[in-house]
Image: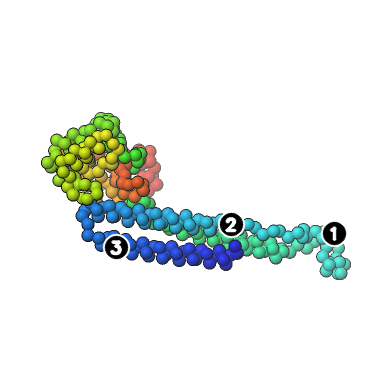
Amino acid sequence: MDDSALETEREELLTQHRKEKKELQSKIQSMKKMKVDKKKKKEIQESIAQLEAEIDTRHAEELKRFTISEPPLGTSTNSGTEPSAVDEVNGLDNKSDHQEEPRSSKAQRRREKKEQDDRERQARIKEEEAVVLKNSPRIIENNRINETLRQRKMISFAVPADGDCLYNAINHQLSLLGIGEYNVAELRNLAAEYIEANKDSMICYMSHPDTGDMLDSAGFTKYCQQLRSTKVWGGEIEIKALSSSLKCPIEIIQANGPSTVHGQLEDASRKLILTYHRHMYRLGEHYNSTKPVPVVEEKRDESEQ
């Protein structure tokens, strides 16, 4: 495929991308206008973020195929060592010390031009891919959280995204502060026991994942059983339960808005600090732990100022 055809195909793809982005924005506006409860609204926001991330990723992948170079054209069969007819007519000495260098063939010049055009095309595509990546929800979220941590002289501590991220992050904080260590099963059971013991006050915040209705007694019992025996993801209810059970304030740093603190009346010296990520993984929300910036890194930053 020649340059003009390749460029035309690329422009058509970019036009299609713009059309798809416009259609997605129209769909997102319709989703935002839906009158739903708070639980469903949260699910819609997550769906919107996932749709935006998926289309950005797909567009970047589709643009990558334009980085494949075209095969070079064949080289000239003329080595430039034979004397030309003009040389022979004019009686020039081909054995002289000042031979004229052979001129580039048309094929050679055309190949060099195509290679230059290809390099420029690849550079433009990489620039567009960088813009797409920079504006992805995941990168934006991570940058905001990392900036908040930097201001507090902290860094993120990653935990596995396996359904137990909340409990592993809390356990890391407890160990870091020297408060104690718990395995995931112990923390899940601790949270379930608190929720069961405080059913009347806790059930008000618990709703059915599909309907959004408040849980009945059977649903409440099932919720606590799943909390104990499965890898069901933990959220604010479990954070509140563990904050009260462990007698530790738990602060959640997030990308949008101020951080939230559960158990503000508990001892501030026992505060556990986690980060909340909505877009880190496609499977759902995620929690990481934190830790202070190592002394060596902190001193190096100060020397650079």
The numbered disc on residue 30 is 3
Could you tell me which quadrant the N terminus lies in?
Answer: bottom right
Q: Quadrant of residue 220?
A: top left
Lateral position of residue 196 relative to residue 275, left or right: left
On the question of residue 205 being in view, the answer is no
x 60%, y 58%: residue: 70
Measuring from the top left, give residue 167's x and y in whole percent.
28, 37
**Which residue is disc 2 drawn over?**
69
**Which residue is disc 1 drawn over?**
95
- Of the residues shown, which amino acid type is indicated by label 2? Ser
x 71%, y 63%: residue: 104
- Of the residues shown, which amino acid type is indicated by label 1? Lys
Measuring from the top left, give residue 189's x and y in whole percent.
23, 33
- Of the residues shown, which amino acid type is indicated by label 3? Ser
Marked residue nearer the N-terminal end (1 or 2): 2
Q: Residues within 10 Å of mark 3 (few under 14, many from 20)?
A: few
Label 1, secondary structure: give it: loop
Lateral position of residue 213 relative to residue 64, left or right: left
Above or below, 70 against 210 in this view is: below
